[in-house]
Amino acid sequence: MEKNLKLAVGSDHGGAKLKNEILEYIKKELKDHSADDFGGSESVSSDYPDMAAKVCEKVASGEYDMGILFCGTGQGMAIYANKVAGIRAVCVTDPTVARFTREHNDANVLCIGGRISGFEIAADIVKTFIGTRFAGGRHQRRVDKINDREKR
Ligand code: RB5
């Protein structure tokens, strides 16, 4: 498992409750890593692209290793995040996909739906996602093709 990963985290109002629970979980159970919150609260309605932009810019610049975004479904966050160069965002609802998308796709932004996933499954998804390394090899060639597409 990688150590000392810097995680950029954000949400809109629809994902804020689960985000806060996961921030606590990272602090207590995943102590090797650190997470900073780039905004979004349950009590103030907000637009998910605003928080996705902040988090994705931090990851794309290399200042943070990975991003975790929460909205109602996770879908809007993922759609926005994938418009940012250098971001490979995935909306995940189970830990098996979290593992394979790290191993095969080198996904660097995880999106979770606060109205879809309960805390226990979300915590498993987060732990698996940040604890799994990209496998490289034949998968590197495929990820290179994704990255090449951004240049066109
Ligand atoms: C906000 O109501 C909701 O649309 C948002 O949280 C998200 O689910 C969008 O994808």
Image (spheres, helix red, strand yellow):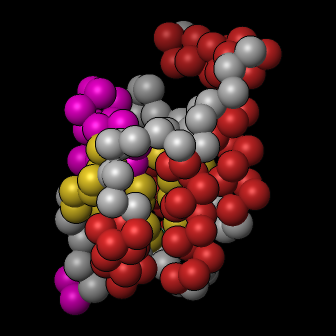
Q: Residue at x 68, y 20 (%)?
A: 136
Name the spot of residue 138 as percent of width and height, x first: 79, 16
Q: With respect to residue 119, does 97 lie above or below?
A: above
Quadrant position of residue 38: bottom left
Q: Is residue 79 left or right of residue 15?
A: right
Name the spot of residue 94 as percent of width and height, x first: 70, 66
Q: Residue at x 22, y 61 (%)?
A: 37
Q: Residue 73: tell me if it is visible.
A: no
Q: Residue at x 29, y 38 (%)?
A: 64
Whether residue 103 is in magenta: the answer is no
Q: With respect to residue 140, does 81 lie above or below?
A: below
Q: Give the total of numbered labels.
A: 0
Q: Residue furthest right?
A: 138
Q: Is residue 118 left or right of residue 23?
A: right
Q: With respect to residue 42, does 2 lie above or below?
A: above
Whether residue 44 is in magenta: the answer is yes
- In front of the other: 78 or 58: 58
- In front of the other: 126 or 67: 126
Q: With respect to residue 115, does 132 lie above or below?
A: above
Q: Is residue 83 left or right of residue 131?
A: left
Q: In which quadrant will I find the C terminus?
A: top right
Q: Which residues are magenta?
A: 43-67
Name the spot of residue 147 as percent of width and height, x first: 56, 18
Quadrant position of residue 50: bottom left
Q: Residue 27: tell me if it is visible.
A: yes
Q: Residue at x 34, y 30 (%)?
A: 60
